[in-house]
Each structure stands twice: as structure tokens, then as C-alpha cells.
Image: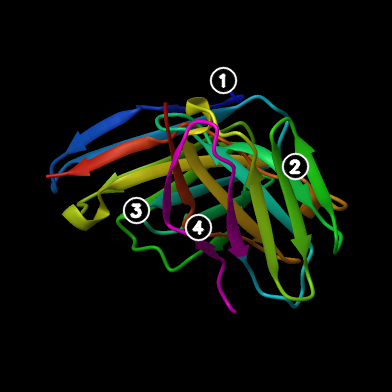
Amino acid sequence: ETGVTQTPRHLVMGMTNKKSLKCEQHLGHNAMYWYKQSAKKPLELMFVYNFKEQTENNSVPSRFSPECPNSSHLFLHLHTLQPEDSALYLCASSQPGTEDWAYGYTFGSGTRLTVV
Amino acid sequence: ILNVEQSPQSLHVQEGDSTNFTCSFPSSNFYALHWYRWETAKSPEALFVMTLNGDEKKKGRISATLNTKEGYSYLYIKGSQPEDSATYLCAFRDNNDMRFGAGTRLTVKP
């Protein structure tokens, strides 16, 4: 366990379903991230939250909707997804601040999403 | 180089072999280079953070070097063991972002 917990581990959903991914950390970190990992591609940054405020949205389609109610929890709400959205969705956290570039991210184990 | 590139994409070695792989990254606006080890169905786990040109880091049988002027880092594994089988990710950190490579998938056969 890294301290970042993602649920569910696996999710199969239809294109008309609405579902949510959850990420939780109790490391005291104030930055949280959603990444998408498709086969043989680099991790693709989707959203960044710093101190509960969204600071980055990497041109992600509106069918993905993030929510950060507090600095320990991050959600990714999914609605009318496409089969090409099938991927591993990773959550990470870090502690922003002076020299934060010297500190890496703590990752969860990911949610394997399949859209049918 | 604008992106982070890792080579080879995958590697199969025999137990006991030593191996190495490469991470290439932009040589401008460098802040740090991170290496992660990612076992299947687990979380990516931080291995090293390297910040200075010429840095060398070591953890057990795994070591890494850094050349920020030419934009590359090498990861070495000495005497590979089956438990070293994983994907090794590198990530380039500038003043804004962390950009990841696609990883090198290492399989060590007993």
C-alpha cells in the first residue's frame, strides 16, 4: 500500500452508463492528479488539483468530469464514454511547495476501465 | 527532443544477466529526472530522483546515471532476478510539469 487508494480496481461500463472513480490519500498531500495510461503509451496527464482547485485540464473531453471535495479525495465522473476510453486510470498525489520538483508522486494502483 | 523517450520498449533477459536501458529527455529547463518501478497490478514505486548533472544513484543492484547536458539517463540492473521483472518508467520534471516516458518492460526469465 502506497497511501493512495483507488476504487474500484476494475470497472466495465456501457457507453450510456454513468460511473465514478474514486481516489483517496491520507498522506497530507495537497496536489492530486488523474492520469490515463493506454497500452504502450506514456502516462497522459488529465487533471491536476492543487489545494482543491483545478489548475490543469489537459484538453480532456467533457465526458470526463473531475471533482475534488477536499484535499484527501478526488473523483473522476464518467458519462457516455466511448470504447477508446478503455484504459488504466491512475491517481497520484504530491506535496507542492519549495523544491517540489525534487519529490516524486505517490501513485495508486489504478482502475482498469473497459467501455463496452 | 521534446518528449521523454525510453528504449528499448521491452527487454527479455536471463536470470543473472546485467542489463541497462535509456531515458532521453529535453535538455532545456531541467529540474529533475525521476525513475519509477511499476510491477503489474501494483502502483508505480519511486526508485530515484536525480537533479544534478553527473548524479549517480544506487539502490541494491539497481543504479542510475544522469547527463543533463545531453539529455539522457541510464538505469542499470546488475545480476537481474525474476523479481526485477517490471516496467521501469522515467519522468522529466521542468518548472511546471512531470512528463513520463512510455516505459521499458523488463522480463527476467529464471
Q: Amino acid at mark 1?
A: Glu
Residue at screen point 76% across, 60% down: B66
Name the image quarter holding the C terminus of chain B.
top left
- Read off the residue under disc 2: A95
Mark 4 closeness class: few <14, some 14–19, many ≥20 residues within 10 Å: many
Q: Which mark is residue A10?
A: none
| Residue annotated with mark 4 | A45
Q: Which residue is mark 3?
A: A38
- Mark 2 belongs to which subunit? A
Q: Can you tell which of label 4 and label 1 is closer to the viewer?
A: 1
Disc 1: which residue: A1
Instruction: Give percent across and percent down for residue B95.
Output: 76, 66
Q: Residue at x 54, y 39 (%)?
A: B17
N-term mark: 3 or 4: 3
Quick one: label 2 or label 1, which is nearer the N terminus? 1
Residue B56 at x, y percent in the picture: 82, 50
Are the two marked residues, 3 and 4, in contact with CB atoms closer than 8 angstroms? no
Q: Is residue A82 visible?
A: no
What amino acid is found at the position of numbered circle 4 in the picture? Answer: Leu
How far is mark 2 from mark 1, CA to CA? Answer: 18 Å
Give residue A4's position: percent from left, percent from top. Answer: 57, 28
Q: Chain of mark 3?
A: A
Labels 3 & 1 near each other (Cβ < 8 A):
no
